[in-house]
Structures are given as C-alpha cells and as structure tokens.
Image (tube, rainbow, N blue to C red):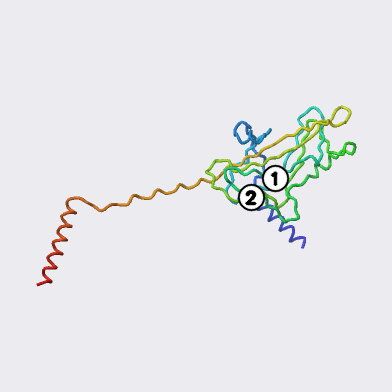
Amino acid sequence: MKAFYKVLSTLIIGVFMTTSTYAAYDVVSCDSSATFAANSCDQCFSGGAVSEGDNKGLLTDVWENNSDSAQLLFKEEQDTPRIVSLGGTSWSEVTASDSVDFWNYTTQLDALYDEDNLGYSLPAGESVTWLESSLGSAYQLVSSSAPQGDEVGMIIYDISVHAVDADGLPDTATDTHRECVMYTSGESIPETPVPETPRLPETGPEHIILALAALLLGFGFLKFRKK
C-alpha cells in the first residue's frame, strides 16, 4: 500500500510539473500593464503563456524582509492568494479532494514563531517561503477565447507584516505588500474564413450563340415531333 501511494504521488507531481510553472517567475515592471496599476500591485511578474485546460500548480510565495528591522507576521491578518480572470476567460480552483486546503503555511514559516509576540518574526535582510499550494491543487484555465498575447489571468499574493522596534515590540501599523503574476494567452484565435464569391455564369458572345443554337435545336425537335 505504501508503494502504491509513492507511485501515485510521483504521478501527480509529474502531471503538475508538466502543466505548471514551478520555476521562478520573470520580474517585469509594474508600468508594463495597466492591469497591474488597476490592482495596486507593488511587485510584478510574468507567469508566461497559458492555453485552455492548462493548470498552474506547485505555487509558492516568498516573504522578503528588505527593511532595516525585523518584521512580524500574524496568520490571522493574511488573505489567501487568488486568481483574477481577464479577457473574458474562466479560471477554477482544482484540489485533490474537498477536504484539502488549496494553500498551506510552510514548515519554514512555522520555525519562525515568536512566543513573546505570538507571531512569526523574520530578521532584516532575510527571506522565507511562507506559503505554498498543496499537492494536487492548481488554478485551471477552463475556457478562453483571447487572442495570442492577450492578458488572461493574474494571481494576486498579499502579505501583511508589522515592523519590530529596537525593544522587540511590533508596530501597530500594518504594512501590506502585493505581488502580482500575469499570464497571457498562448493560443492564436483562427480567423473566420472569408467565403468565396460565387462564380457567375459565363456571358461572353460565344456563350450567347451556343444558347441560341440550343433554343433553335429544341424548337426544331418540337416541330419534327408534331409532324
């Protein structure tokens, strides 16, 4: 039975590795798309091209502390990532079963728990993968009619933290950072074929003569039958 589950896990991972973007995203300017500005994105990435039926799984998010002081994170203040459908597309969340959560906190984050502040503390200049999608979970592009290169979806990752002062006390103000990953259509929509212009009957002089000859022959045949 254990061997069966190992094989099953390997197959699941294989499927999502071939239909998902597991590597790091390419960083792009947030000025590169009006959609980034419309969604108040602070840091922007390109997720590449997707086609109808593609899955985006094995997703992770990194908490980076680029400040001069430690930061504190409380799980109760976090919003789970979400995908925004663009260009008339339809996306859905796929999970291995109804009892499985799409997003989970990582063991790396759990190791940063601060008993004094009842939160998770990250030193200045450090980073940690704090959130990951569960095995078998993915965002699936259900339907799309967008032309190649058009925006079709965007995953939004929010993280809310508090700066920690020199005495080890968290600031009451919340600093929220938003990362956005944009996907574009990898399919070109076929052009509607232009119907051919119907070919009209020939009307040159030679065709008129042939038509008259046919009429005369028909008239002669009728006279012959009457006799």
Q: Position of residue 164 (x, y in %)?
A: 84, 30
Q: Nearer the viewer, residue 22 or 118?
A: 118
On screen, residue 32 above or below 134: above
Check disc 2 and report its element: helix, strand or loop: strand
Q: Residue at x 54, y 47 (%)?
A: 145
Mark 2, Cα crowd under 10 Å, few <14 / some 14-19 / many 20+, is many
Left or right of 114, for residue 104:
left
- In the rendered image, the residue lying farthest to the right is 116
Q: Residue at x 58, y 50 (%)?
A: 143
Q: Residue at x 61, y 31 (%)?
A: 31
What is the C-alpha distance between the residues marked 1 and 2? 13 Å
Mark nearest the camera among 1 and 2 is 2
Left or right of 110, for residue 55:
left
Image disc number at residue 140: 2
Q: Position of residue 16 (x, y in %)?
A: 66, 51
Q: Hey, what amino acid is under mark 2? A: Gln
Q: Where does the N terminus fall, quadrant-wise? A: bottom right
Q: Position of residue 176 (x, y in %)?
A: 75, 34
Q: Hey, what amino acid is under mark 1? A: Leu
Image disc number at residue 59: 1
Q: Position of residue 33 (x, y in %)?
A: 60, 34
The quadrant where residue 120 appears: top right
Q: Nearer the viewer, residue 112 or 163?
A: 163
